[in-house]
Amino acid sequence: RTGFTLVELLIVIIIIGILAGAMLLVAGSGTDKANATKIVSDMRSIKAAALMKWADAGNWDWVTSADTPANLQLQLASYMDRKIDDATVADYAINTDTSPDIYVEATDIDANVLAKLIPMKGDSGLTISGDDEPVLMKLK
């Protein structure tokens, strides 16, 4: 007889299914790491734009109106090379509640992405207090 038996075909299908499942787990973890890196990149871009705006304005008075993602985009539009609210993985704002310090704040972050951000906080200058707290990057 030529060809494969039903048992042989089932074993091959099961092995392919196990390998595909393992690849999905690895790919999901990579997506979370990529989103965490995007958050750090966005926060650095916002920080640089905010510092340029401060240099032009000479004060931080404009920060009080940059408390929501839409207002932040309006305030920093001329200093940013791209819109930060396009397909973002977090909401960004400027946090002045920690006076005298001012922070770039990222909220509404997925728990898996936040887990990838925690090991990155030392190298990227992030402050992460807890699971429900915003991710902060100091401006001044």
Image: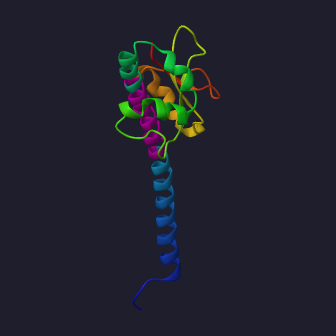
The image shows residue 8 at horizontal and vertical percentages of 48, 76
- The residue located at (43%, 20%) in the rendering is 125
Residue 109 lies in quadrant: top right
Viewport quadrant of the N terminus: bottom left
Q: Given the current orientation, which residue lies at the most extreme right position?
A: 132
Q: Given the current orientation, which residue lies at the most extreme bottom position?
A: 1
* Placement of 17 over or under 2, stated as above or below: above
The image shows residue 73 at horizontal and vertical percentages of 48, 35
Q: Which residues are magenta?
A: 30-48
The image shows residue 68 at horizontal and vertical percentages of 57, 31
Q: Given the current orientation, which residue lies at the most extreme front position?
A: 57
- The residue located at (46%, 49%) in the rendering is 26
- The residue located at (42%, 28%) in the rendering is 46
Q: Given the current orientation, which residue lies at the most extreme top position?
A: 100
Viewport quadrant of the C terminus: top left
75, 95: nearer the viewer: 75
Q: How is the image coloured?
A: rainbow
Residue 40 located within the stretch drawn in magenta? yes
Residue 44 located within the stretch drawn in magenta? yes
* Placement of 15 over or under 126, stated as above or below: below
Q: How many marks?
A: 0
Q: Main secondary structure of the magenta part?
A: helix
The image shows residue 97 at horizontal and vertical percentages of 61, 15
Q: Can you see residue 23?
A: yes
Q: Can you see residue 91?
A: no
25, 39: nearer the viewer: 39
110, 79: nearer the viewer: 79
* Placement of 19 over or under 116, stated as above or below: below
